[in-house]
Amino acid sequence: ARPRRSQPPRGIVPAADRALLPPAAKPVGRSSRQKTTGRMSFSLDATLARADQISGLLRTSDGKDKAIALLQYVAMFASGGEAGTALAIQKSLGAARKPFRVFKPIETLMPLLTGATLRGGKRRPGQDLARALSLVKTLGMTFYFAADHVVWAGAAGVLSDKSLAQRAQKVSYWSWCLASLAGLATATRELTDALDAMTAATKKDDDEEKSAAAAKAQKLMTAVVANATQATLALALLEKLNLSKRQVGGLGVFLSLLNCYTMAPALKRKTA
């Protein structure tokens, strides 16, 4: 008689057949649900933190001015200088920025009136140049905002002399360019000092001092880019550069985004 083949106990699959079976699906347990909930909570917290940051930017008149400037240059980029809805929106937004600048000439002139621009303590190398650049920037921004008020008066019909409004527009742009160039020179000098401080901290192997110098250098690099872009944009608006309206609009969008980034409060991060 043939020997009987032994059968495995019920419920047990032979090892030879086990590889042919599809892999068993892992049950969705409590840990998976917790991970999903955690991701949703993190996403919501990040969204609320970003919304709070934007709200902080819009709490100030300067923040509102820069936010509207961003929309204005977006409309300029979209219109390309051609008549239509986008150009009308651009002009309307440009007029909407004026109320946020009502007292800006006084605000920018106050450091000069109080002596903060020219006052200094112990004389240091290059201090006279720094004061001169600060004075040029202060006066430039003051004339920029003051002349812009004359432009607004002409657009609003308060000033009947259109040629005066046109001359004021050029004075405004030239003043902005001059102030931006002074700011560019100041930021470049300070950036050089910050980089030298980083080099010295690296040689001393002082991580804390190096980190502080690096953070300062990053802010100054942003200031260099912003002032250079402002000067370029002012020359473009004066039609001293061969740029199309769409290119000028794109340059304005970049500058406005940079201004909003630098003016926005620090992002609040949730701590455990």
Image (cartoon, grey):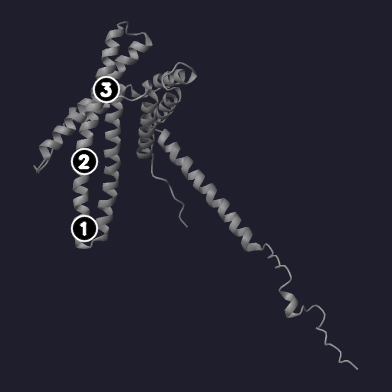
- Tell me: 168 left or right of 13: left
Q: Residue furthest bottom?
A: 1
Q: Secondary structure at mark 3?
A: loop
Residue 139: name its quadrant.
top left
The reply to whether discs 1 and 3 touch (Cβ–Cβ < 8 Å) is no
Q: Which residue is mark 2?
A: 188
Q: CA distance from mark 1 to mark 3?
A: 43 Å
Q: Percent from the top left, x then y, of residue 264?
A: 38, 39
Counting residues from the start of the chain, the first of labels 3 and 2 encountered is 2
Indicate the amino acid at tag 2. Thr
Q: Give the labeled residue for mark 3.
A: 240
Q: Residue at x 19, y 51 (%)?
A: 196
Q: Residues within 10 Å of mark 2 (few under 14, many from 20)?
A: some
Q: Is residue 257 above or below residue 3?
A: above
Question: Which label number is shown at residue 201?
Answer: 1
Relative height, residue 165 to residue 107 (above, below): above
| Inter-mark Cα distance, 3 to 2 | 24 Å
Which marked residue is nearer to the observer: mark 3 or mark 2?
A: 3
View extreme (front): residue: 1
User: For the point 35% across and 39% down, which residue is it?
Assistant: 262
